[in-house]
Image (cartoon, rainbow, N blue to C red):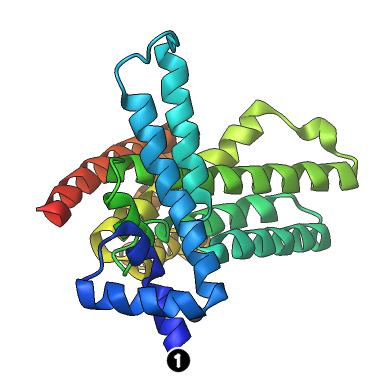
Amino acid sequence: MNEHEKMKELIPFYAAGTLPDEEHEKVAQHLQQCPDCRAELQLWQIVSREIRTSDQKLGAPALKQTPVKKPSRHLWKAWYILRSQVTLIRTEIWVSSALVSLLGIIVALLVENVNAIYFLAPFVSAAGVAYIYGMQNDPALELTLATPISAQQILMARLTLVFGYNILLTFSSSILLLLLNGQIAQFSWAVLLDWMAPMAFLSSLALFCSLLWGSVNAVVVAYSLWVVKGIMPELDCSGQYAAGFTTLVDFLNRVETPSHLLFISLLLFALAMWFTGKKQIKLLA
Ligand SMILES: [Zn+2]
């Protein structure tokens, strides 16, 4: 890694004002002679300033002569947080999700079955969500913890962006496919819920696991579960444990309704939020 790359990595921390004096000085010196890094710094400063000022502005007790209604204040704040997080989410998440969705469309066209898209969607979404808030070195986290926004708000904003993006991708892929096949009439709310619930379930599971064991392990857990669930009904149940196994498969099939899955998703999400709150206290202590 050359000097420029090293300095560029430190810029988010420089912008957040969290570097030790010596390193701060080094970055400052490099910035004077490197237009590329100055541009990078500008980006991070905009993000950080936007979060800070929006929070101060919105958090200030009723600005004179401009009574702002409470709901819209909250909406504005949510909007600022969302916007600030767009640039901080790993670019790979946006790109790879789009690529896999494209792959899903191609496979679905080849096998002439829209279910190929619905089968792939939970995998894509879970992978994206597992990486929004890992335990790895996260300059964005450092920056945001230096602002008056809570880690839970950051988590919620990123989850909304990544999960929403994946819902949008799956939705547009399936509409495109149904249009191409001339089967658009098959579309219904029940179908929508049928694929959204597994996506929400696997994503919230991945999120929860990523907070506990890191992103990679979270993806492994979520993927294993989904693959096992996928091949379970195909397994030959003629052994000694056949009866018990069949009962288990029956039980899981009965439990796995969209409403049950959505309920479990909410539970996992609430746990993830609680855990993030606890972790932030530890980080700041
Ligand atoms: Zn540079």
Report which residue position mark 1 lands on. 2
> In the image, is 117 to the left or to the right of 159?
right
Q: Which residue is drawn at 41% across and 75% down?
A: 9
Image: 181 above or below 230: above
- What's under tag 1, amino acid-wise? Asn
> In the image, is 160 to the left or to the right of 243?
right
Q: Which residue is drawn at 44% across and 32% down?
A: 78
Image: 198 above or below 88: above
Check the picture and name the quadrant holding the N terminus. Answer: bottom left
Query: Is residue 253 at all visible to an observer of this figure?
Result: no
Which residue extends farthest left? 285
Q: Residue 108: x and y, percent? A: 76, 57
Q: Residue 173: x and y, percent? A: 74, 48
Q: Which of 255 and 250 is in front in this view?
A: 255
Q: Residue 229: x and y, percent? A: 45, 57
Q: Residue 32: x and y, percent? A: 46, 76
Q: In which quarter of the image is residue 69?
A: top left
Q: In which quarter of the image is residue 24?
A: bottom left
> In the image, is 25 to the left or to the right of 177?
left
Q: Which residue is drawn at 61% across and 65% down?
A: 96
